[in-house]
Image (cartoon, coloured by chain):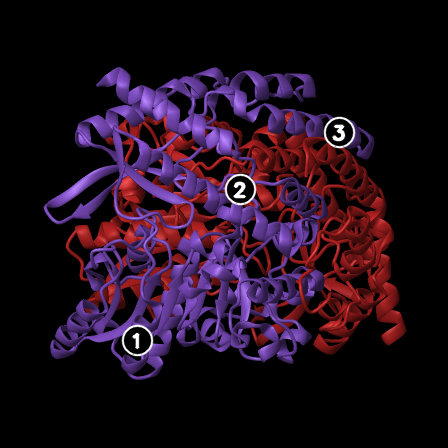
Chain colours: A red, B purple
Amino acid sequence: MTPGEFREQGRRLVDWIADYMERAGDRPVRSRARPGEVFAALPEAPPERPEPWDAILRDLDEIVLPGLTHWQSPRFFGYFPANASGPAILGELVSAGLGVQGMLWSTSPACTEIETRTLDWLARLIGLPERFLSTSGRGAGVIQGTASEAALVAMVAARERAIRGGARAESLVAYTSTQAHSSIVKAGMVAGLGAERVRLVGVDERLRLDPSRLEAEIERDRGAGLTPFFVAATLGTTSSGAVDPLDSIGRLAESEGAWLHVDAAWAGSALVAPEHRWMIEGVERADTFNFNPHKWMLTNFDCSALWVADRRDLTRALSITPEYLRTKESDAGAVIDYRDWQIPLGRRFRALKLWFVMRAFGAEGLREHVRRGVRHGELFERLARESDVFEVVGERSLSLVCVAHRAGDAATLSAMERVNDSGEALFTHTKLPTAGGERAVIRLAAGGARQTDEDVRAAFAALERAAAETG
Amino acid sequence: MTPGEFREQGRRLVDWIADYMERAGDRPVRSRARPGEVFAALPEAPPERPEPWDAILRDLDEIVLPGLTHWQSPRFFGYFPANASGPAILGELVSAGLGVQGMLWSTSPACTEIETRTLDWLARLIGLPERFLSTSGRGAGVIQGTASEAALVAMVAARERAIRGGARAESLVAYTSTQAHSSIVKAGMVAGLGAERVRLVGVDERLRLDPSRLEAEIERDRGAGLTPFFVAATLGTTSSGAVDPLDSIGRLAESEGAWLHVDAAWAGSALVAPEHRWMIEGVERADTFNFNPHKWMLTNFDCSALWVADRRDLTRALSITPEYLRTKESDAGAVIDYRDWQIPLGRRFRALKLWFVMRAFGAEGLREHVRRGVRHGELFERLARESDVFEVVGERSLSLVCVAHRAGDAATLSAMERVNDSGEALFTHTKLPTAGGERAVIRLAAGGARQTDEDVRAAFAALERAAAETG
């Protein structure tokens, strides 16, 4: 492909994406493809000769689009939002166009230093203490692919720190809540602790990790000769958005010498608005803090921001330097080599999209976006409170509300399925612990990049209609 | 950003990238930025108000470009190539524009099924046996971020299989060669084996893992009550491109019941040309096979293709299903959920760029690209053989040749540094084991997407000139 052809097809695809943005709301939100349908639409063997771009674009329209669940539709309220935005898409485009590797500082200094600076910016923007900024000389931020990788990196660093401190690997125990994301347990599985050495501590009636139970579990494990080495607190759980009491948890972790990891994957974006910073009271005790701008901060996946209080904890656990990766700048300790802060060796220039987003929206644009999401959560909450059919379960957290049909789980799930089948909106479900067992709920997760009040109202109306039709 | 503004800025950036492609060879290959220079060029705090795109584009030219080492320059011969190409860049653009998540089949069926199909295509294209294709019903491919992640996933799956088979976690030992990539040891560190339980087996005079030494190490470990559970063979080592004898290694692994992982990260791309398939003799014994289209197969980073012979080995080791991730298609076992084949939960639509590359180049275009890289390796070899100053060390492997100054290591490294400082070309170094110890060599790694004979000649001439000037 010559640069001239790239110009031509590139413009076509930019237009195609702009058209997609404009029409994303017109499509059924959830794909109607049946298992195997897309697979069968592609030939069994790769083409021997080059195919024309017309054929590729036609397949984008005819095979790809019907096979997608449209996360960028303004009526997507499932899981958590995975915000895309124009500036972030263009950041990915430029990153791909430059095609540089940021594994070492010297393999592209700008790739490393723009990342370090934009994560300093982001730390300021969400109110993290100075110790997490690179300018502290000890902490700094790094972009990981996902919160799962951030949790794994933190756990591995914690393990090495504990072993350096004299603990036996076999004695190590980690703690998080029953409501924490599955990635914490998965990190334990990958790191070789096994799921059974990740304790799932019970929660209070607001589904927050209960510090008194954490204390009791730690005491029991200490009594059995085990070593508590890692505690993960969640700010904004996946099921209900519960915010663990960071301050109390941090004091316990500190008194045990355990690593405190804060998983704010979704709710972290809300911290750009100062009214939500009550969540991070006590964050100065954290060893690592993580949130995903790729969820609710307009930055395309993947962009998971991880800050570490002492960068040496990461590099001691993850650094290996064969001869072919030695450089004089690294040998001199003058630079950051991000390969030693992550699982992979290679890395692309992901900071560009974050830099573009922060510049194109400005801090005020990001605050406005988050506040709109919270207003939409409030609107969902109000609509559900006014409803005769649905009720709010638990409490709204930021832009997330859980609702259930008053008639019980079957009615809840069948109303949701009916909306999802209709394509008018998309919700996902979970089960929340209750006094008597657990209850199925529909999660209404607002925060999409292009959502309006009208989308929220239309989605809730679809849910009420579905309930009436199935009722 | 409205769709209209996206159209306007998108076209501008497509043109900017096309200009970059056209000019990439005019810039100094290695960045001249000093540590901290790019960081200092960015303000301390993020902008409060949105900035205009003119400011962002100006900074791309004035701050970013001088801070890059140009991996896409036709005179980049360092590390291994990290091929970008027009079709792959556009694939990344479309993936970002669609902004879908492929963690579950149901979160975008096309994202999963196009990946499964294109990896079947790719398996055919490189001559892998039928058992690695999804159509076998048992094996299939998956895109990982990097070969490091592929090795970690393989090792974790191997560990769980060994433990299911009755082995104690503490007894497990892995094997690879002293010349294997550092990612194998890193996988051991992350997975909790520790570097010390990854045995680095000695190599023969061609720097290939020596099966008789592997056998002896296994016997010694068995004698000590340990359990050999994982063997990684390398096709194309990073330092010299050595190709381990897969067939013999596979027989040993098989007789031990150990997992055989094949790391063909770089050399795997060469398999598109049938004359290089001698390397995979014995691959039918592999449990996992991995190579990086993002190195030498024109597909932008990140795209590391991993095939597994029995997909249940991955899903048993990596699957956790909280309620909020349950879907009826997954419960029915009718679909692939790639989240259970990888470390992260989320994943973007990376198959698009691979699909675009295979269609836009066709199989014949990919073979032509790889063959041109090999011809450039041969040209480097010839130039070095004709040289009075340099000599070839060891043997060329595909597009990789190692050369050294006849006067010794200091002369070798100073000639390389002088070229790298000049910006005329970029090489990296390594040290190769020799009878008497080790020898510093310059690695000439051809295979860039836009390299010509002229670039190869110019780069070698720069090296000879540098040697004359320092000599």
Q: Which residue in the protein does label 1 denote?
A: B253
Mark toward the start of the polypeptide (1 vs 2)? 2
In the image, residue B382 sits, relative to residue B231, either above or below, namely above
Circles 3 and 2 on the same subunit: yes
For label 2, the crowd category at 10 Å Cα-Cα, with few meaning under 14, some 14 to 19 and many 20 or more, is many
Chain letter of the residue carrying label 3: B
Can you see residue B4?
Answer: yes
Count of numbered badges drawn on the protein: 3
For label 1, the crowd category at 10 Å Cα-Cα, with few meaning under 14, some 14 to 19 and many 20 or more, is many
In the image, residue B351 sits, relative to residue B64, either above or below, namely below
Residue B333 point in image, percent of width and height? 62, 79
Can you see residue B302?
Answer: no
Q: Which residue in the protein does label 3 denote?
A: B11
Q: Could you tell me which residue is drawn at 37 percent across and 34 percent down? A: B383
Mark toward the start of the polypeptide (3 vs 1)? 3
The quadrant holding residue B424 is top left
